[in-house]
Image: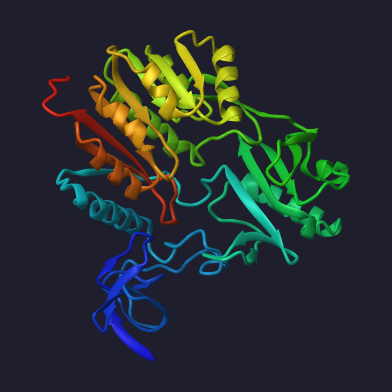
């Protein structure tokens, strides 16, 4: 059955929201205020999902998507609107989350200097002869020749990798391929489904001396095959080396803004950086004349942080390897005025929140890529109140966002 409806709002994944027969309905690739004809594809007890058959009226914010794989690949979901409107949509979605904690303050939005060609890393999947990206909510792989939100150098590598994989008939032997790039140099990591011998010399010749090739069996430890073994660059006045499996934010320019904002909001000289990753933010904190105690569970990331500490003579950086909920109680002290949290999408462990609530910490700076778990954790930190929140558009054209929340102890006179 076909329904005509008006889009009234946005869902958390940037889909349009309307009502059909009194039930909330989510429709992707539409904009607030538009009229559309649609049909229902999913009916649950609490909501509907529908697809557009025809747009009956168009928003003035609508644009023609540039990507030929739009609506096929599940990555970008906002290419049908201009970039300024994308920012407004994300701000509105974040505000709807924050209403759960009665936040009535401003949201400052930091736009990405680039809405395309910003990604320094991509993961490609291989299946049924296709090399590309997955459809949304599916394991089906969309064959792609390039990705418009990736840096040009990554797309050059993708073209050569596709040629190599096809010529060697390797597609069904590969789980996925990771390509990362920094300053004209790239690393390519083939995650193989099984142990097979592959001669990568032809690919290395195609890629040139500024590339390196790695392999592993599925998610095993990467093995260096040919070419570069790491990427070397200067970040935040730090001499950095990135391995093929090192963590790094995928939008360099927005990440720099984010880390600058973290540093500006630190109070005191002793800082704990929980869920600290490969140590880039920890190093930047120390470079700004602070003492940083960094906690990271991932062994590879911890080793990266230790290497960076030695390489940059960061004597006031102390890296701890282990689970945050176990190590934080041992590290937090009466001298700790600021804790920085940057957990994965699932948010902080309840025990981490309990430790913070029982501490003498005055300020919490929380970095999050998931507004839902961010708000949940702010609710749990009942000793603190949200003073300000900022949205960093780390992922233009997609539904994802990075947020920075600054919380202070209630009735604190912290300056």
Quadrant occupied by the N terminus: bottom left
- In-front residue for pair 66/361: 361
Residue at point 29% right, 56% down?
93
Q: Is residue 199 left or right of residue 360?
A: right
Which of the two residues, 13 or 188, is positioned nearer the viewer here? 13
Q: Tell me residue 184's x, y (percent).
A: 65, 36
The reply to whether residue 192 is in sight is: yes
Q: Position of residue 306 (x, y in %)?
A: 57, 18
Instruction: Give residue 377's quadrant in the image.
Output: top left
The percent position of residue 85, horizontal first and vertical second, equals 32, 59
Nearer to me, 290 or 396: 290
70 left or right of 45? right
Where residue 393 sits in the image (x, y, percent)?
A: 38, 46
Q: Is residue 59 visible?
A: no
Query: Given the current orientation, which residue lies at the most extreme bottom position?
Result: 1
The residue sitting at 27% across, 78% down in the picture is: 23
At 35% across and 37% down in the image, what residue appears?
A: 350
Colouring method of the image: rainbow
Residue name at image x 49 percent, y 8 percent: 315
Give the quarter of the image for residue 8.
bottom left
| Front residue (pair 320, 259) | 320
Location of residue 358 with respect to 91 vertically, above or below: above
Q: Quadrant of residue 387?
A: top left
Q: Compared to 350, does 358 lie above or below?
A: above
């Amino acid at each position: 059955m076909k329904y005509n409806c008006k889009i009234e709002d946005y869902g958390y994944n940037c889909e349009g929201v309307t009502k059909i027969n009194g039930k909330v309905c989510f429709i992707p690739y539409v904009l607030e205020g538009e009229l559309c004809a649609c049909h229902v594809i999913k009916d649950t007890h609490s909501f509907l999902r529908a697809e557009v058959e025809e747009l009956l009226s168009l928003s003035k914010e609508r644009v023609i998507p540039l990507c030929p794989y739009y609506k096929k690949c599940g990555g970008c979901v906002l290419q049908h609107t201009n970039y300024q409107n994308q920012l407004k949509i994300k701000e509105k979605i974040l505000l709807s989350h924050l209403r759960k904690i009665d936040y009535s303050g401003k949201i400052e939005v930091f736009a990405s200097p680039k809405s395309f060609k910003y990604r320094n890393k991509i993961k490609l999947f291989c299946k049924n002869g296709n090399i590309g990206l997955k459809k949304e909510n599916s394991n089906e792989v969309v064959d792609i020749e390039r990705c418009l939100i990736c840096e040009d150098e990554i797309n050059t590598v993708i073209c050569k990798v596709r040629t190599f994989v096809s010529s060697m008939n390797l597609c069904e032997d590969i789980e996925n391929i990771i390509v990362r790039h920094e300053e004209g140099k790239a690393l390519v990591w083939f995650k193989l489904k099984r142990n097979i011998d592959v001669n990568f010399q032809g690919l290395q010749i195609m890629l040139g001396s500024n590339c390196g090739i790695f392999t592993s069996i599925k998610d095993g430890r990467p093995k260096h095959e040919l070419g570069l073994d790491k990427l070397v660059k200067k970040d935040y006045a730090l001499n950095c080396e990135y391995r093929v499996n090192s963590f790094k934010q995928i939008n360099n320019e927005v990440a720099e803004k984010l880390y600058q904002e973290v540093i500006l909001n630190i109070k005191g000289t002793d800082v704990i950086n929980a869920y600290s990753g490969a140590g880039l933010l920890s190093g930047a904190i120390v470079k700004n004349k602070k003492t940083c105690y960094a906690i990271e569970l991932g062994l590879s990331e911890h080793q990266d942080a230790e290497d960076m500490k030695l390489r940059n003579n960061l004597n006031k950086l102390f890296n701890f390897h282990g689970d945050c909920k176990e190590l934080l109680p041992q590290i937090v002290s009466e001298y700790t005025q600021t804790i920085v949290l940057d957990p994965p999408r699932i948010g902080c462990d309840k025990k981490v929140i309990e430790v913070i609530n029982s501490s003498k910490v005055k300020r919490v700076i929380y970095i999050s890529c998931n507004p839902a778990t961010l708000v949940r954790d702010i609710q749990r930190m009942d000793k603190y109140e949200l003073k300000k929140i900022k949205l960093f558009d780390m992922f233009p054209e997609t539904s994802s966002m990075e947020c920075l929340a600054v919380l202070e102890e209630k009735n604190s006179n912290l300056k």
